[in-house]
Amino acid sequence: MAELSIIALVAGVLALCYLSVYPKLAGSNFNRLSMCDIVASTVVFCLVGSKYWGSDFQFDLLLFHTNWFWFTLVVYGFFEVPLGLWYFKKHGVKI
């Protein structure tokens, strides 16, 4: 159940950001997009960390168990890479 709450949080935040916030605030500007993404990821990690920091809860990543930080990082990357590629292509973001 804890895994699902983190997955839902990450998916919700990234969907909100990539579909609403980033197009309005960053557009196709890579630097603004990067700063917005740093803020979004910091919010996610602060929310998850506030609940699981210091706990010995083990999260299941199919092949192994890990702590909250690594689980959140892997899930965040899993969702953000395809969304980021889609956003870059749709908005013509140049690095």
Image: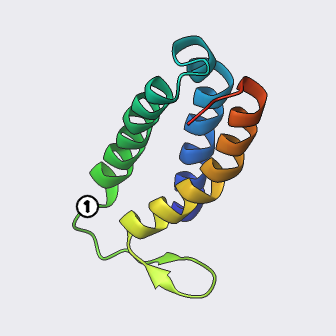
From this view, report whether residue 3 is shown above or below residue 14: below
How many residues crowd around disc 1 within 10 Å: few (fewer than 14), some, or many (20 or more)?
few
| Residue 16 location (% of width, % of height) | 61, 28
In percent of the image, x 30 and y 76: which residue is there? 56
In percent of the image, x 37 and y 64: which residue is there? 69
Q: Is 79 on the left or on the right of 10, as rendered?
A: right
| Residue 86 location (% of width, % of height) | 75, 39
Quarter of the picture holding the N terminus: bottom right
In percent of the image, x 65 and y 42: which residue is there? 84
Judged from the image, the secondary structure of the residue bearing numbered disc 1 is: loop
Colour scheme in the image?
rainbow
| Residue 21 location (% of width, % of height) | 56, 19
**Which residue ends up furthest to the left in the rendered image?**
54
Quarter of the picture holding the C terminus: top right
From this view, report whether residue 65 is shown above or below residue 4: below
Q: Image quarter for residue 91? A: top right
Q: Amino acid at mark 1?
A: Trp
**Which residue ends up furthest to the front in the rendered image?**
95
| Residue 30 location (% of width, % of height) | 52, 29
Q: Which residue is mark 1?
A: 53
Q: Is 76 on the left or on the right of 68, as rendered?
A: right
Q: Image quarter for residue 70? A: bottom left
**Which residue ends up furthest to the bottom in the rendered image?**
63
Of residues 80 and 29, the one nearer the viewer is 29
From this view, report whether residue 11 is shown above or below residue 35: below
Of residues 37 and 12, the one nearer the viewer is 37
Q: How many marks?
A: 1
In percent of the image, x 26 and y 61: which residue is there? 53
Q: Is 68 on the left or on the right of 85, as rendered?
A: left
